[in-house]
Image (cartoon, rainbow, N blue to C red):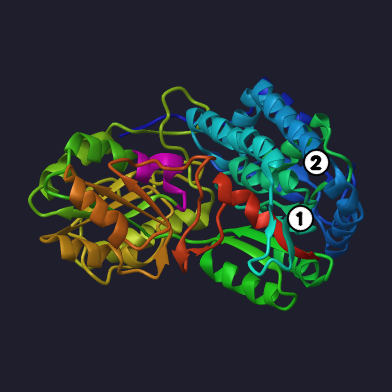
Amino acid sequence: MTIVDTVTELSARETDLLDRVPDGLFILGNWEAGTREPIEVQDPATGRVIKRIANATPEDGMRALDAAAAAADAWAATPPRVRGEILRRAFDLLQERREDFALLMTLEMGKPLAEANGEVTYGGEFLRWFSEEAVRISGRFGQSPEGTGTMVVTQRPVGPCFLITPWNFPLAMATRKIAPALAAGCTVVVKPAELTPLTTLFFAQLLADAGVPAGVVNVVQTSTARDVSSPIIADPRLRKLSFTGSTPVGRSLLAQAGQNVLRTSMELGGNAPFVVFEDADLDKAVDGAMLAKFRNIGQACTAANRFIVHEAVADEFARRVTERVQALRIGRGTEDGVTIGPLIDDRAVASMAALVEDAVSRGARVLTGGSAPEGDGYFFEPTVLVDVQPGSDILREEIFGPILAITTFSTEDEAVAAANDTEYGLIGYAFTQDLARGQRMIDRIDTGMMGLNTGLVSNAAAPFGGVKQSGLGREGGLEGIQEYLSTKYTLIPA
């Protein structure tokens, strides 16, 4: 693998873009300066601060909820066509500003610019999809079975929502939550991740430019997430909580949400199995592995975590994957040809080193990578491990980094048992040319999503979500808008 020299100074274009990103809290359509010590946003490729922004207090969070509650009735009464057209304008504006959004994500999160452009495309599709779904909210009308009256079933917005987004997909996770909420007629308070808040602030300004009324979308970034979130969740005016992040934090939020019986959507951790059978097309399997493992520098809940490969093809699979990994180029995501950017912070680097050390101490072998290169930034070499032993931390924990860990199996039942040997169930991958076996994998691997002979499944038109400890609810697809609607039944006597 090649390490590309990292530029240490911001370019004129980068400086201009950062200057145009709002640095305040967005409440009731206004940008407000904070009263606390500001949040310092770093470029993970250099570790240097690139912007200082307002840092919300618990009082700021409650004022944001006040704004969302005050705007709720008017926005719910806004015709669905109008709501849809505003979302469509937001989609169009995002296409016009896509280069700015892509560069901003690369600066604050680190992903290569080509991947950031891909996220603009993916994130934008939630705006377009839900702009179309806004006018398709429907109900039912019919005679009761006894003939005693007419039954009318309608759907209504659930009310003000609190949306907590993660740092790894700063735009797509915002659009995936905000777009269906607005399409359904809900107002929102958004709390972006402290590590990557700039994209959300830039997006809030875009929504205002698209015509979203004041108070419908409010943004409160903070360095004290619990202190700001807890009062919002405890307030009876809030009716919906959506969170993407770790399972431990999700459990805590669910407990809080239970006090007011909130509607919840939880997209939590993953430990995705990637099963390669002896009859798999290895070219497709290796292509799928590179996508499923190294997209977003491995920092994705959908990233393949455990590579479970049939013993007959394991050596060849490992050889081909290692060749591809060694061809990757490490560096700042803005540099030409870079395919692996930095991890998000120094804790992530330390976590990767600890996982490799534990696996090797139990008998695993490193075929390539395995350490953090010297120099600025939070980089870790793309790594391939083989002979990973049962009980290794890397098989139990969500890796969230560029480490590909291979174990082997002999029979289909062994493969399924290994794939399901986890508390998580977000997504699984399977590669086989046997159609019947493929169908069995869909039925037997216990996950909310499945990639059959592909390493990339996410799509705005599809329901995204998991089972077991990977969460509840779905985002995207026909199901996505239902998370923001409540059902009301009325009987009209004959």
Q: Quarter of the image for the C terminus: give it.
A: bottom right
For the stretch drawn in magenta, the main secondary structure is helix
Q: Nearer the viewer, mark 1 or mark 2?
A: 1
Residue at point 30%, 40% (across, down): 288
What residue does disc 2 label?
A: 23
- Give neighbour class at mark 2: few <14, some 14-19, many 20+ (Cα, 10 Å): many
Write the start and end of the magenta stretch as one range.
Answer: 291-301
**Quarter holding residue 140:** bottom right
What residue does disc 1 label?
A: 156
Q: Quarter of the image for the N terminus: give it.
A: top left
Badges 1 and 2: C-beta atoms under 8 Å apart? Answer: no
Q: Nearer the viewer, residue 358 or 492?
A: 492
Q: Earlier in the sequence, mark 1 or mark 2?
A: 2
Give the side of residue 85 with respect to residue 379, left or right: right
Q: For residue 389: magenta?
A: no
For badge 1, the amino acid type reads: Arg
